[in-house]
C-alpha cells in the first residue's frame, strides 16, 4: 500500500480577499491531511495563491500599485488567515516564487520539444474576469461568458497553442478506466460530455499584457507571457521540485486535488492533458465541491452578504465553524450558510450529543466511583455494544477516502447515539442502588471508550476540542492511540477522569449582525447595470403539455421544451387567463436559470414571462416561429 498522501487546494486567485468558499475547500483539505497523518501516512498538504494574469494587472493599476505589490498584499491575507485558522499545510506556494517560474518554463520546454506546443494566431472571445477563452458556440447570446455572464471581448493576437485536441481520446479513456478520477462520481458525466463535444487546441500565451511567466530563453520570444491556467495548474508539481531538484516528487501523483465546481473543467481536462504531455502520472482524484449561498441567496458584494470566515470563527468558534462546514452539506452539492443552521448544529450535535455525553460520564464517575474509570469488565457485560461500535467504525475510512465528510460525521455520530442510548437503557444509578457496582462501572467505561474513539475520529475536524476530550479521558491523540483504540478496538486503561468545563455552551441567538441588502428607494426607477441583466438567461420555449394543479385557483403546470434533453416543468400563475388546451404548442419566453422552487408542492424549474395591465395578462413570445432554446437578447 502507498505510504504517502498528497493533498492540494486550488491556489487561490489574489483578485479578492478570502471568503467562505476558500475556507470550505481549505478546511476539507486540512481535515483530510490530519486524518491521513493520524492513520500513519506520510502526508504532504499544499495550498497557496495564483498571482499572474490580466485581471491582477488591472486590479493593481486601479489601486496605484505594481502587480507584485498588489499580489504580495492579497497573498499575505490568505496566508495570515490560514495561519490564524491553524491550517496544517506543509507548503504555501505562490506563482511568483522563483522555483515555480523555473518549473513552468521547464514544462513549456518539454511540451514544445514534443511538438505539443506550436505558434499561431488566436482570435476569439475572451473573458477577463474568468481569464478564459470561449468558442462562440458556448457564449450566452453569442456574446457573454457562459461562466460568469459578463460580456466578452474579441481578442486577436499571436499566441502559442497547446495541442489539447491530440489528447481527447486519451482523456476519454482515462475517465472510462478510472471510475473515481472525479469525485463525486456524479460530476464525471458533465466532463465527459464536454470532451466528447470536441476539444480545440488551447491558447496558452498572451502578448497584450506583461504580468505573467515569460517563455524560456530557449524559445526566444520575449514578448509572450504564459496564460494563467498553464502557469497555475503546474504549481501542483513545481511545489514538489519539478523543473529543479525534484526533492519531493516522490509525493506525486496527488491523491486529492480539492476544487470548486467552477474550476472542474480546468482540473479534469486541461491538467491531465498537460500531465500526459509531460509523461507524468495522473492524479488519483479530482474532488469537486459545490458553492455556498447565504440564507438562500447568492453571495455578492453588492448585496453585502458575503460570509467572512474570520468573522464567523470569532463569533462562534473556529472548531464549531469547521464542523458546520463539513457536516451541513453533502460533498459536491451546494450549501447554504445561515446563523440559525450553525446555531442548531452547535446546540444539537455538539452540545446535546457530544458535550452532554461527556458531562454525563464525568458526573456519574464522580458521583459513584470518585472519578475512577476501569474498562476491565466492559467485554463481560457489553459485548453486544462493543460489536456495534466496530460495525459503526468499519465504513468510516471509506467515507474519508471518497471525501464524503458529511457522511463520515453523520455515521460517526451513531457512536454518540449508542452511548446516550446505553445510559438510558441500562440506568447505572439503578445498578448502584441495587449493589451492581461492577456492572455500573463497566457501563460508564463503555461510554468513556465510545467518547475516546469518537475523539480520535473527530480530531481531524475539531482538533483542539478532541484533545480536551482525550485529556479528560486520560490519553493523548496520536498515531499510536489511533491504532490501539480505533484500528485494533482496544479499550482504555484504568484512569482518573478529569473534570472540565462544558465544551459547547448553548447559544441562545445569533451572534453576528445580519447584513441586509440596501432597500430600494420608494420613488423613481431602480436601475441595474448590464452585468446584472446578463445574469438572467431567457430562452424561447414551446409548451408541449399543460394541466391544472388541483385545489389551485391560479396555477397551471406546464411542460416547456427549451432545447434540452427533457422539457422543463414550470408552474405559472396564469390559470385565470388561459386554459391548458389553448397553451399547448404556444411559444413563450422562459427565464431558464432561475433557482428551482416548489409552489403548492409542485416543482417549478423556470418562469414564463408575461405582461399584465388593466385588461388582463398576456404571455410574451416571439412573433414568428423560433427554434426551441434560442436565447433572447
Image: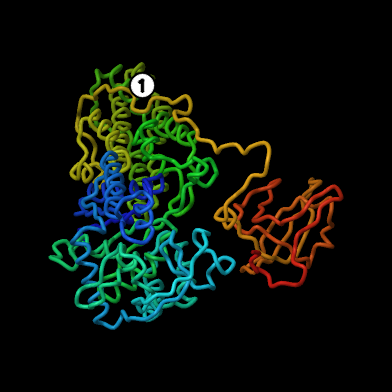
Vertical position of residue 518 compared to residue 116: above or below = above
In the image, taking residue 214 as reference, residue 204 lies left or right, namely right
Q: Is residue 380 visible?
A: no
Quick one: which residue is furthest to the right in this view?
615
| Camera sees residue 214 | yes
Side of 227 relative to 96 (left or right): right
At label 1, counting other C-alpha atoms closer than 10 Å, the crowd grade (few under 14, some 14-19, many 20 or more) is some
Q: Is residue 34 above or below residue 376?
A: below
| Residue 253 falls left or right of residue 622 | left
Residue 97 or residue 20, whichever sits in front: 97
Relative image position of residue 208 (x, y in whole percent): 36, 68
Compared with 372, 171 (above or below) is: below
Q: Which residue is mark 1?
A: 431
Which residue is found at the position 69% from the left and 50% from the top? 602
Nearest the camera: 548 or 498? 548
Q: Is residue 77 above or below residue 233?
A: above
Q: Position of residue 355 (x, y in %)?
A: 36, 29
Query: How many discs mark residues in the rendered view?
Result: 1
Q: Residue at x 61, y 69 (%)?
A: 565
Q: How is the image coloured?
A: rainbow
- Write down the quadrant of residue 540 in the picture: bottom right
Residue placed furthest toward the bottom: 115
**The C terminus lies in quadrant:** bottom right
Which residue shows up at 47% across the image and 24% down it?
A: 508
How far across and how far down the image is residue 54, in percent?
A: 37, 61
Image coordinates for residue 246, horizontal then vertical, percent:
15, 65
> SS class of the residue under badge 1?
helix
Q: Quadrant of the N terminus?
A: bottom left
Q: Is residue 348 left or right of residue 86?
A: right
- Front one among 402 and 102: 102
Q: Name the image quarter holding residue 165.
A: bottom left
Amino acid at each position: 500500500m502507498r505510504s504517502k498522501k498528497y493533498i492540494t487546494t486550488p491556489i487561490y486567485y489574489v483578485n479578492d480577499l478570502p471568503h467562505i468558499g476558500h475556507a470550505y475547500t481549505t478546511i476539507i483539505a486540512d481535515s483530510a491531511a490530519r486524518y491521513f497523518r493520524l492513520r500513519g501516512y506520510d502526508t504532504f498538504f499544499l495550498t497557496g495563491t495564483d498571482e499572474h494574469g490580466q485581471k491582477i494587472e488591472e486590479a493593481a493599476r486601479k489601486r496605484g500599485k505594481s502587480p507584485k505589490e498588489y499580489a504580495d498584499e492579497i497573498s499575505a491575507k490568505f496566508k495570515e488567515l490560514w495561519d490564524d485558522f491553524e491550517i496544517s499545510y506543509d507548503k504555501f506556494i505562490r506563482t511568483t516564487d522563483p522555483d515555480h517560474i523555473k518549473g513552468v518554463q521547464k514544462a513549456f520546454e518539454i511540451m514544445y520539444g514534443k511538438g505539443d506546443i506550436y505558434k499561431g494566431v488566436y482570435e476569439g472571445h475572451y473573458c477577463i474576469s474568468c481569464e478564459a477563452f470561449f468558442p462562440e458556440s458556448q457564449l450566452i447570446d453569442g456574446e457573454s461568458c457562459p461562466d460568469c455572464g459578463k460580456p466578452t471581448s474579441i481578442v486577436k493576437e499571436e499566441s502559442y497553442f497547446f495541442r489539447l485536441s491530440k489528447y481527447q481520446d486519451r482523456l476519454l479513456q482515462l475517465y472510462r478506466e478510472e471510475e473515481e478520477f472525479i469525485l463525486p462520481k456524479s460530476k464525471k458525466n458533465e466532463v465527459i460530455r464536454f470532451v466528447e463535444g470536441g476539444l480545440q487546441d488551447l491558447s496558452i500565451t498572451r502578448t497584450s499584457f506583461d504580468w505573467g511567466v515569460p517563455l524560456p530563453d530557449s524559445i526566444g520570444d520575449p514578448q509572450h507571457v504564459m496564460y494563467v491556467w498553464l502557469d497555475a495548474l503546474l504549481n501542483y508539481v513545481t511545489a514538489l521540485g519539478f523543473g529543479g531538484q525534484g526533492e519531493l516528487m516522490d509525493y506525486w501523483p496527488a491523491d486529492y486535488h480539492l476544487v470548486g465546481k467552477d474550476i472542474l473543467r480546468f482540473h479534469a481536462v486541461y491538467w491531465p492533458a498537460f500531465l500526459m504531455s509531460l509523461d507524468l502520472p495522473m492524479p488519483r482524484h479530482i474532488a469537486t465541491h459545490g458553492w455556498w449561498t447565504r440564507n438562500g441567496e447568492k453571495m455578492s458584494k453588492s448585496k453585502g452578504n458575503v460570509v467572512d470566515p474570520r468573522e464567523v470563527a470569532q463569533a462562534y468558534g473556529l472548531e464549531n465553524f469547521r464542523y458546520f462546514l463539513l457536516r451541513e452539506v453533502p460533498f459536491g452539492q451546494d450549501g447554504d450558510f445561515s446563523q440559525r443552521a450553525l446555531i442548531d448544529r452547535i446546540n444539537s450535535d455538539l452540545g446535546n450529543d457530544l458535550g452532554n455525553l461527556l458531562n454525563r460520564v464525568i458526573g456519574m464517575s464522580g458521583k459513584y466511583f470518585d472519578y475512577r474509570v476501569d474498562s476491565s469488565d466492559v467485554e463481560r457485560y457489553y459485548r453486544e455494544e462493543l460489536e456495534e461500535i466496530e460495525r459503526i467504525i468499519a465504513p468510516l475510512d471509506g467515507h474519508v477516502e471518497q471525501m464524503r465528510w458529511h457522511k463520515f460525521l453523520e455515521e460517526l455520530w451513531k457512536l454518540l447515539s449508542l452511548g446516550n442510548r446505553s445510559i438510558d437503557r441500562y440506568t447505572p444509578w439503578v445498578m448502584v442502588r441495587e449493589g451492581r457496582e461492577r456492572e455500573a462501572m463497566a457501563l460508564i467505561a463503555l461510554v468513556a471508550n465510545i467518547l475516546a474513539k469518537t475523539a480520535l475520529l473527530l480530531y481531524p475536524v475539531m482538533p483542539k476540542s478532541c484533545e480536551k476530550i482525550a485529556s479528560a479521558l486520560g490519553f493523548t491523540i496520536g498515531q499510536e492511540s489511533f491504532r490501539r483504540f480505533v484500528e485494533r478496538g482496544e479499550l482504555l486503561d484504568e484512569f482518573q477522569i478529569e473534570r472540565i468545563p462544558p465544551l459547547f455552551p448553548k447559544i441562545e441567538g445569533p451572534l453576528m449582525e445580519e447584513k441586509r441588502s440596501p432597500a430600494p428607494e420608494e420613488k423613481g426607477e431602480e436601475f441595474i447595470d448590464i452585468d446584472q441583466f446578463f445574469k438572467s438567461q431567457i430562452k424561447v420555449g414551446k409548451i408541449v403539455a399543460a394541466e391544472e394543479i388541483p385545489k389551485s385557483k391560479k396555477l397551471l403546470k406546464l411542460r416547456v421544451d427549451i432545447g434540452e434533453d427533457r422539457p422543463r416543468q414550470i408552474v405559472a400563475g396564469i390559470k385565470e387567463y388561459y386554459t391548458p388546451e389553448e397553451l399547448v404548442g404556444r411559444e413563450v419566453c422562459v427565464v431558464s436559470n432561475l433557482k428551482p422552487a416548489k409552489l403548492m408542492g409542485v416543482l417549478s424549474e423556470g418562469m414564463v414571462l408575461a405582461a399584465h395591465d388593466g385588461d388582463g395578462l398576456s404571455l410574451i413570445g416571439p412573433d414568428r416561429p423560433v427554434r426551441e432554446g434560442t436565447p433572447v437578447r
